[in-house]
Image (cartoon, grey):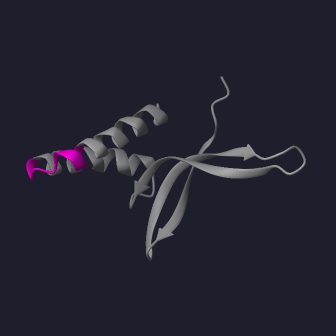
Amino acid sequence: MNEPTRKIRQSTSRGTPSYQLGHYEMSGDKGKRRSVFKVDVHLGEHPTAEDALAAWPQEVDHLRQIGRESKAEKLQDKLDRLQELTQ
């Protein structure tokens, strides 16, 4: 249907630049509407979705090898969501 246009924006958290993939939505009453950026996926240090898609599978494998299964599952969920959004 009406798929929102997704954009990547840069943000800074604790002095470290990070990137977010999201879209703008209008909110508020008629005549007082504002656009609000809704984040779909946090890309972390990766400035493009392609960079994240290339790096995250290796990170998931590494996390599983060192026994960080919970963190690997969270990253795998982000990877799956990003793949879904970019297709």
Compare residues 5 and 37 and report the one nearer the observer.
37
Compare residues 72 and 10 and report the one nearer the observer.
72
Name the side, left or right, on which 23 lies relative to 44.
right
Compare residues 45 and 71 and report the one nearer the observer.
71
Instruction: Give the percent coordinates (x, y) of residue 70.
Output: 21, 46
The residue furthest right is 31
Rendered residue at 88%/43% (across/down): 30
Name the side, left or right, on which 27 lies relative to 57.
right
Name the side, left or right, on which 31 lies relative to 38.
right
Name the side, left or right, on which 87 lies relative to 28.
left
Instruction: Give the percent coordinates (x, y) of residue 87.
Output: 46, 30
Instruction: Give the percent coordinates (x, y) of residue 64.
Output: 13, 46
Rendered residue at 73%/51% (across/down): 35
Rendered residue at 38%/61% (across/down): 45
**Figure check: 45 above or below 69:** below
Instruction: Give the percent coordinates (x, y) of residue 56.
Output: 29, 48
Majority SS type along the magenta span: helix
The residue furthest bottom is 15
Quarter holding the N terminus is top right
The stretch in magenta equals 65-72
